[in-house]
Amino acid sequence: MSTVKRMGLVIAIAYSLSVAQADAQSVKTCVGAEVLSIKESPESRYSDDQTKTIEVTASESTEKAVTIVARGPVLGSMDWSVVETNLACTQHGILLTANITRSAGFTGSTLKNTPWIPRINVVVMLRQPDMLFEVRWRMRLTTGEELTPAQPPAYPEQIYPITMAKIITRPQ
């Protein structure tokens, strides 16, 4: 193997290792918890009792982490399926702000509406026995105007922001 090819291979391996190390780092570190990952996705199969909930399960990634699933309000075709998230540390834990964007020019009808709910999976390593996990769902139009009351067709009006909270306990 030539020196140039060998040097290229060494650079490629070093780059791959640095990317892998960057992926292994946490998304956000707070006093009592470390967020290891966050993933947003739309969920089309749900029941009404699954909306606006926070569920906690042991994480498969590590025995000391938990997976927190935050489900939001019922949305429709006029809402973007990508939910913008922001994590912040609070005095008692973590605040996840989820920004939903609704088309300001939506002209669809109820018959064409496809209801769905946003789902956010957050893997957290707790550094203390428990912490407060809060989710704040906000709604804004594509024009940037923030909505307070909003109504997806065929569903009751929803007042925004929606704030939910749950005490998360570290697995034993």
Image (spheres, rainbow, N blue to C red):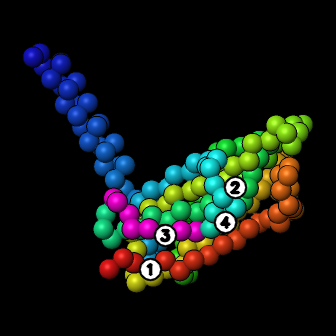
Q: In x, y percent, where is residue 149?
A: 87, 62
Mark 1 or mark 2: which comes first in sequence? 2
Residue at the outermost top position:
2
Residue 56 tag number: 3
Q: Nearer the viewer, residue 51 or 10?
A: 51
Q: CA distance from mark 1 to mark 2?
A: 26 Å
Q: Amino acid at mark 3?
A: Val
Residue 169 tag number: 1
Give the main secondary structure, helix, strand or loop, of the magenta stretch: strand
Please say if 131 is above or below 139.
below
Residue at the (33%, 71%) spot, across then down: 64
Q: What range is drawn magenta here? A: 54-61
Please say if 22 is above or below 172.
above
- Contact flag, marks 1 and 3 (Cβ < 8 Å): no
Residue at the outermost front position:
47
Q: CA distance from mark 4 to mark 1?
A: 23 Å
Q: Amino acid at mark 4?
A: Asp
Q: Is residue 59 magenta?
A: yes
Mark 3 or mark 4: which comes first in sequence? 4
Q: Amino acid at mark 1?
A: Thr
Residue 99 tag number: 2
Residue labelled with disc 4 = 49
Mark 4 or mark 1: which comes first in sequence? 4
Q: Classify mark 3: helix, strand or loop.
A: strand
Please say if 75 is above or below 16.
below
Q: Classify mark 1: helix, strand or loop.
A: strand
